Amino acid sequence: MSGIPAERVVSVGGHDIGYPHGHLGYLTEEEENALRNFKVYLTEKGLYTSSQNPSHDDQTLLRFLRARKWVIQDAYKQFKDTEDWRKANQLEVLYDTIDVDAYEETRSLYPQWTGRRDRRGIPLYLFQIRHLDSKTVSNYEKTAESTNVSKAQPDGSTPQRLLRLFALYENLTRFAQPLCTEMTDREHPRTPITLSTNIVDVSQVSLRMFWNLKAHMQAASTLATAHYPETLDRIFIIGAPYFFSTVWGWIKRWFDPITVSKIFILSPGEVKPTLEAFIEPRNIPKAYGGELEFSFFDRPNLDPKIRRAVSWENGYTDFPEGPAYWRPIDGGKKLECIAVGSKGGVQRRERVCTIPVAFPKEESAAVKDEGVGAAEGEIQEGVQGLSIADDNTAAELAEKVAPQAAEGENKTTPVSA
């Protein structure tokens, strides 16, 4: 497939877009002002309450601001649409009460968390498209549309099959990202994780199969972009067939230009070196040249560092199937993981484990007062097991590893709109 050179996308604040820029701890003065003004505007509109426990955390508000290029009115519209959509479809009730078996059935059709993270500490997901044959998808959609698997009473504007998908997005934002946020063995440990890195394997997929999946994937991508903005970071497409340029013509229209610029199409020879530039080999599945025992459909192969950080309770030694989320306890010094959903019609609500909060609010506020520069110096010295000299920023690594694609060759291509 012929490629287009990666284009560096610049924010209105004047610096490159991309983690950690535009995230907490790495905001320009203009972006800090935009966040403050956004809160004021949302408060006036009745969509935000500020207190010791605000209705929405800063990292969530920043996702909408980044998605709308820091234009407050545009961010407000998307935020309001999302809040209305969540209320109309009772997303909180859906996630709390969804049948665990139905949740796992849905999970098998979409990206799977490997239990690992990339070099920046962002959760790593794997998606193998070949499992979505027309029979599997058709049977799933018929079953999903005919069965309400939770106590939620949606307004009917969003199909049931997609609502079940968004239970998985809730798991990303309420379980995987908060867990990875509390892990400090990363370059920017005080910056909350709000993204995901995805390996998308399109090998063994025919043009007919892509065509049959087009409506299914387009609907999911459109709603995800609208209501879960700025949750995707690097996307590595592996195993692209010769006709993928045609398929790419459809796919890139589903995403905004910034997301499109983060998608890398890898040839077979470039899979291992490119992935290793972004992900430690021990966290790359063996099928793609790494050391991790992980196959699609597997439960997460949990990072040993995460295992050491959590304290298991109630007989658990791993995270169970189904939905779960984290909530603060002990005055915000710890988070507890609560397994929810239902099994055999019986509601589940059980503590799985706890994890210490790496930087409690009081400490974070004190560090902020001392100045970001001084704090960042301490952070860099305190990161264990991470060599900044070896692990350059993702952008720098991309420039080193991803060569320009020549016409007619399958070269690594960070694609831009």
Image (tube, rainbow, N blue to C red):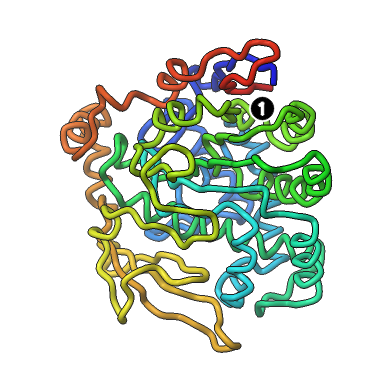
For label 1, count other residues whose C-alpha is less than 10 Å away and answer few (under 14), some (14-19) or many (20+): some
Where residue 255 sits, quadrant-wise, is top right
Residue at 63%, 11% in the rendered image: 406
Residue at 60%, 69% in the rendered image: 103
Closest to the observer, 368 or 24: 24
Q: Secondary structure at mark 1?
A: helix
Q: Position of residue 208 (x, y in %)?
A: 83, 43
Closest to the observer, 92 or 300: 300
Q: Which residue is mark 1?
A: 257
Q: Position of residue 136 (x, y in %)?
A: 74, 62
Give the quarter of the figure containing the N terminus: top right
Whether residue 82 is situated above or below residue 331 in the rendered picture? above
Residue at 71%, 58% in the rendered image: 85
Q: Position of residue 31 (x, y in %)?
A: 48, 30
- In the rendered structure, the answer to whether residue 24 lies left or right of residue 84 reads left
Which amino acid is tagged 1? Answer: Pro
Closest to the observer, 15 or 216: 216
Where residue 416 sits, quadrant-wise, is top right
Q: Position of residue 370 (x, y in %)?
A: 21, 34
